[in-house]
Image (spheres, rainbow, N blue to C red):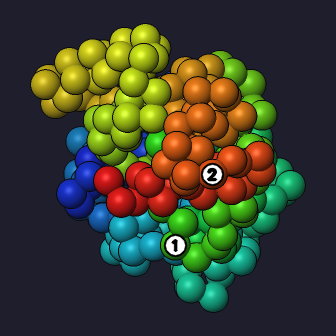
Amino acid sequence: MLEIKALSALSDNYIWVVKNQGSNRVAIVDPGEAQPVQQYLSEHGLAVGAYLITHHHGDHVGGLDSLLAEHSAPVYGPAGEADRIAQITHPVTGGDHFTLDFLGVDFEVIDVPGHTLGHIAYVTPGVLLAGDALFRGGCGRVFEGTHAQMQASLARLRALPEATEVYGGHEYTQKNLAFAQTVEPDSSAIATVIREVDELRANDQPTLPGTLAEEREINPFLRWDQPDVVAAAERRAGRSLTDAGEIFAVLREWKDAS
């Protein structure tokens, strides 16, 4: 049974600590900062069994050097960005599988280019470690790839089982849902989640994870084929839209401008 803990880092990042109840070794996901991890390990008497890195941005790898100096462990990361993440010892790419014995689970790697060209996600049954590809109610900006690439990446994630919990890299949910409500102002599903999320944030609690079942109902970036979302994108673009990648591009550029 996996336990996954959110450690707040930097301004709005989450570092995820993945633990099996029967082990004192953990996997650390995207340590953008060392101090929160070091403190948590010390307080709970834990050791690091592996680091899982989704992409090269500094707010996801900035703590690696300091952590490795005190807590040496294998570093899994995107083979396509190994030239930008020098600490990677186990480069992986889409379709790869590996087992972390101390967690008792097998991970599959999914290529999700768009936010960065080499971005990957890690999946084990019921859990998606999504980095900056997918957030609750939103998705990452398209910095290095194309909108078509990002839409295809999100299509891969959308196809995972609906009970999968999505662990993204940032606390962006309130802003994401505000945009989602702009796209679909009459959605009762979005309104319900907004109330839940506002209560969590009022109590300084993380709003992640959500589930893919929920994302399919509230996240405009997974709803490029839903009539209300298509209509909203067409109004924004001022033209008819039929291609999924083009619909996604209109939505992402709309969000970027908001």
Instruction: Indicate the amino acid at tag 2.
Output: Arg
Q: Judge whether residue 151 can be spotted in this image.
A: no
Q: Contact, CB < 8 Å: mark 2 with mark 1? A: no
Tell me: 196 left or right of 219. Answer: left
Near-viewer residue (102 or 154):
154
Give amino acid for label 1.
Answer: Phe
Q: In this view, does 50 lie above or below 160?
A: below
Q: Mark 1 points at which residue?
A: 143
Where residue 64 appears, as percent x and y from the top left, is 42, 71
Q: In which image quadrant can residue 146 be found?
A: bottom right
Look at 71% across and 77% down and name the residue there: 80
In the image, residue 84 sits, relative to residue 242, either above or below, namely: below
Q: Is residue 245 visible?
A: yes
What's the residue at 72%, 55% (across, down)? 245
Residue 241 x/y as whole percent:
70, 48
The x and y percentages for residue 188 are 43, 11
The structure residue drawn at horizontal position 64% and vertical position 72%, both measured from the top left corner, is: 145
Q: In this view, does 248 lie above or below 228?
A: below
x then y, percent, for residue 60: 43, 65
First in residue order: circle 2 vs circle 1: 1
In this image, 148 relative to 212: left or right? right
Q: Residue furthest right?
A: 95
- Residue beneath label 2, please? 239
Nearer-the-camera pick, 96 or 152: 152
Report helix, strand or loop for mark 2.
loop
At numbered mark 1, what does the secondary structure look like: helix, strand or loop? Answer: loop
Using the image as rendered, state which of residue 171 and residue 68 is in the foreground: 171
**Residue 9 location, quadrant:** bottom left
CA neighbours of label 1 inside 10 A, class few (<14), some (14 to 19), many (20+)? few
Distance between the alpha carbons at the discs numbered 2 and 1: 25 Å
Quadrant position of the N terminus in the picture: top right
Q: Which of 227 and 166 is in front in this view?
A: 227
